[in-house]
Amino acid sequence: EPVLRDRGPAIALAALIMNHDDPTSSFMTMWSDHSINEKNGYFKKLLNNAELYLNANPEATLTIGVQPTYAHTGFGYIKKGLKTANKYNLPLYKVSSFTEKPNKARAEKFLKTNSYLWNSGYFIWKTDTLLKLYKEHLPEVYKILQKIKPHLGTKNQQKAIDLWYPKMPKVEVEQGILEKIKNNIVTIEASFDWIDVGSWKVIKDTQT
């Protein structure tokens, strides 16, 4: 990224480059300021099964939700819908809605219902599907991608990115893409120790 335009454009550019290199590629967002404590290779197995599901359902959007252990106000939440049957041993649910960081009272209500998961920010797509979602929901981003696309794999690739990327709008992928998807979006209910340490007020949660 020659300039910061939040995660929406950054993910779009990465997906464009990956799709150019391999049109059948899969794409997953993960964040460097997270702490994952898992045993027996649980997370690796989960991701492997998620990719198998995605290969069989290439138009799907997969999210990973973490079982909340208390009413945290520093995380977003995913509301689970109906359970989705699958042959990949995934605890899979339709996504009913996303909620940004709630206040304490609302977070406590979420916890009591057992219908909400912490939004890990881990999203999985086929790159072809993801680019189609940008075309539909963030056309202003997609149009700029098309300016960059002819230069991928050439000596002018970075020059084109430097020229066009600063014209991107600032937008987050949740608000720009995920919250607008009405169909074929599911969440995996994951059970591993996870924390987002992106702010000082939650860093104490990793000191266990």
Image (spheres, grey):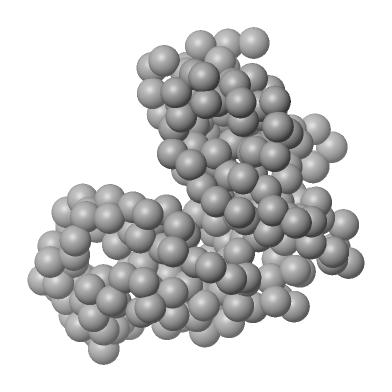
Q: From the viewer's perspective, is residue 121 above or below residue 207?
A: below
Q: Residue at x 69, y 53 (%)?
A: 81
x, y (%) of residue 19?
46, 79
User: Left of 153 or right of it: where is 148?
Assistant: left
x, y (%) of residue 188?
71, 51
| Quadrant placement of the C terminus | top right
Q: Quadrant of residue 141?
A: bottom left
| Quadrant placement of the N terminus | bottom left
In this view of the protein, which residue sits in the foreground, 26 or 153?
26
Q: Residue at x 73, y 34 (%)?
A: 114
Q: From the viewer's perspective, is residue 58 above or below residue 9?
A: below
Query: Number of numbered discs present?
Result: 0
Q: Residue at x 68, y 59 (%)?
A: 94
x, y (%) of residue 143?
23, 80
In this view of the protein, which residue sits in the foreground, 30 or 190?
190
Q: Residue furthest bottom?
A: 150
Q: Quadrant of residue 24?
A: bottom right
x, y (%) of residue 48?
75, 59
Q: From the viewer's perspective, is residue 129 above or below residue 177?
A: below
User: Left of 154 or right of it: where is 42?
Assistant: right
In this view of the protein, which residue sits in the foreground, 104 or 150?
104
Residue 14 can be seen, yes or no: no
User: Left of 158 or right of it: where is 179?
Assistant: right
Q: Residue at x 59, y 21 (%)?
A: 108
Residue 163 can be seen, yes or no: yes
